[in-house]
């Protein structure tokens, strides 16, 4: 079963904490870093997909126009 965005962010936070402690040897640190990069890419993919889904329908001149939702 695929993990949710929130679950993956929690996993990423744990990896960051482990790396920041500095208790891991070089091989384990590299493995954790690689795992973190993989999770980061997956989270980025989820965010990009969500951004594509978030749209506003604007009625303009009797036509429906789809625009990207912008939080700024």
Image: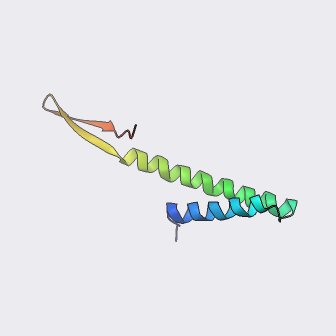
Name the residue at 55% across, 54% down: 43
Could you say which quadrant of the image residue 26 lies in? bottom right
Instruction: Please give left or right for residue 62 compared with residue 43 in the image.
Output: left
Q: How is the image coloured?
A: rainbow
Residue 38, percent from left and from top: 65, 55
Position of 68 relative to 45 (above/below): above
Could you say which quadrant of the image residue 30 lies in? bottom right
Name the residue at 60% across, 51% down: 41
Please identify the quadrant where the C terminus is shown. top left
Position of 17 relative to 66 (above/below): below
Q: How many marks?
A: 0
Name the residue at 52% across, 71% down: 1
Name the residue at 74% across, 64% down: 18
Q: Residue furthest front?
A: 21
Position of 2 relative to 51 (above/below): below
Instruction: Please give left or right for residue 47 compared with residue 18 in the image.
Output: left
Instruction: Please give left or right for residue 40 compared with residue 5 in the image.
Output: right
Residue 20, percent from left and from top: 75, 58
Q: Residue furthest bottom?
A: 1
Q: Residue furthest left?
A: 62
Instruction: Please give left or right for residue 49 compared with residue 62 in the image.
Output: right
Position of 9 relative to 50 (above/below): below
Residue 70, percent from left and from top: 38, 38
């Amino acid at each position: 079963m695929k993990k949710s965005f929130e679950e993956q962010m929690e996993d990423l936070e744990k990896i960051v904490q482990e790396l920041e402690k500095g208790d891991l040897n070089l091989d384990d640190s590299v493995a954790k870093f690689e795992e973190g990069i993989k999770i980061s890419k997956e989270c980025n993919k989820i965010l990009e997909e969500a951004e594509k889904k978030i749209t506003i329908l604007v009625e303009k001149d009797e036509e429906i126009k789809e625009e990207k939702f912008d939080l700024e």
